[in-house]
């Protein structure tokens, strides 16, 4: 059974970490409406996996085809860049000429930065740690980004990207946040709210449980916040992390941002040892529980979804893996929502 921690800050938030206000899902939808490749992704019923989990219903939001980039991340950095281009005005595909965006990524966030930069005339540089699968580097280069390998883990590659931004007067575009660096990560998280907007429109009823996988926490925080606006206090919001990288769980335990230690996880896009400050502030308020899953449990979740005809990765299926591993309070009457956050690495 997945290891769980109840959130003692639920509905109150962290005393010394205020939530950042002003996210607007309507602004996201309005900007995306101008994008010719944007369309809503499917909300899929998964009766076979629901039966395996022993629940009444399993709904899965399938982000594998999002805007041709293969993951939910297409809505994050590319949206943040689009906002900056719209603010400049003029011919949009030339609006950001001369600008360079730099980031660190475990794969998908970098692709969103690269795609957004290319669309609006900017350059992109993406730092990858040596744990990132090689196919991601090829995809990034295919989108026109320069790839730089640096560091043994995500945190080390982010430090290298931040240093490069300072040295070269580039714009750092991270999906994590920390004191003094919040504006662009806030817009990245705002973009993810589009997923929740679509789920709300596509759902025939309100789930009893929502399982949200997390690395630095941006996706989980954005979806939990937007779903609460529509569905109120009813659904249990459960955040799922690798046992090797329980950054959000341990930060909730401590009541502040903490850096965790652990081995490299097969859940590469979730293998983040330090949470986003903005995401932690929101999840402390909105999430009911934080759970971790083992590498074996993650692999079982991926295998189950592949058998159901929905191939992904251990990162992409982490919420389903937690459901299959077993969670207290989920039973035969439960209606569960999960996010299939990315496609296979070799897709």
Image (cartoon, grey):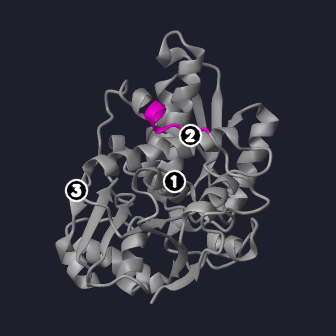
Magenta residues span: 22-28
- Residues at marks 1 and 2, CA–CA distance in whole angstroms: 10 Å
**Which mark lies nearer to you, 2 or 3?**
3
What quarter of the picture does the C terminus occupy?
A: bottom left
Q: Left of 99 or right of it: where is 56?
A: left
Q: Is any atom of residue 140 visible in this view?
A: no
Classify 306 as above or below 70. below
Q: Secondary structure at mark 2?
A: loop
Which residue is painted at 44% across and 56% down in the image? 135
Q: Residues within 10 Å of mark 2 (few under 14, many from 20)?
A: some
Give the percent coordinates (x, y) of residue 306.
25, 71
Q: Which residue is mark 3?
A: 204
Q: Earlier in the sequence, mark 2 or mark 3?
A: 2
Q: Earlier in the sequence, mark 1 or mark 2?
A: 2
- Residues at marks 2 and 3, CA–CA distance in whole angstroms: 26 Å
Q: Which residue is mark 2?
A: 23
Q: Secondary structure at mark 3?
A: loop
Give the percent coordinates (x, y) of residue 21.
64, 42
Q: Is residue 207 magenta?
A: no
What quarter of the picture does the N terminus occupy?
A: bottom left
**Quarter occupied by residue 123:** top right
Q: Residues within 10 Å of mark 1 (few under 14, many from 20)?
A: many
């Amino acid at each position: 059974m997945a290891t769980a921690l109840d959130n003692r800050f639920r509905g109150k938030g962290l005393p010394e970490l205020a939530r950042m206000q002003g996210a607007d899902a309507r602004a996201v939808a309005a900007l995306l409406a101008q994008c010719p490749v944007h369309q809503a992704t499917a909300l899929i019923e998964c009766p076979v996996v629901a039966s395996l989990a022993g629940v009444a219903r399993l709904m899965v939001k399938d982000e594998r085809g999002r805007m041709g980039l293969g993951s939910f991340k297409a809505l994050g950095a590319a949206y943040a860049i689009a906002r900056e281009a719209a603010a400049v005005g003029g011919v949009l595909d030339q609006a950001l000429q001369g600008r360079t965006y730099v980031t660190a990524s475990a794969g998908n966030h970098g692709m969103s930065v690269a795609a957004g930069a290319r669309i609006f005339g900017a350059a992109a540089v993406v730092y990858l740690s040596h744990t990132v699968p090689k196919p991601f580097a090829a995809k990034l280069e295919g989108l026109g980004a320069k790839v730089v390998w640096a560091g043994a883990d995500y945190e080390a590659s982010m430090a290298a990207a931040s240093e490069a931004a300072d040295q070269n007067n580039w714009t750092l575009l991270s999906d994590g946040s920390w004191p003094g660096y919040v504006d662009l990560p806030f817009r990245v998280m705002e973009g993810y709210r589009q997923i929740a907007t679509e789920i709300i429109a596509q759902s025939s009823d309100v789930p009893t449980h929502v399982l949200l996988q997390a690395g630095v926490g941006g996706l989980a925080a954005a979806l939990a916040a937007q779903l609460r606006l529509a569905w109120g206090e009813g659904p249990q919001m459960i955040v799922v992390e690798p046992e090797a990288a329980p950054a959000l769980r341990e930060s909730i335990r401590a009541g502040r941002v903490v850096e965790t230690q652990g081995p490299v996880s097969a859940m590469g896009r979730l293998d983040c040892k330090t949470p986003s400050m903005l995401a932690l502030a929101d999840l402390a308020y909105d999430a009911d529980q934080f759970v971790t899953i083992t590498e074996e449990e993650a692999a079982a979740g991926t295998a189950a979804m592949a058998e159901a005809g929905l191939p992904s990765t251990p990162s992409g299926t982490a919420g389903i893996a937690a459901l299959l591993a077993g969670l207290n309070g989920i039973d035969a009457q439960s209606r569960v929502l999960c996010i299939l956050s990315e496609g296979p690495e070799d897709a």
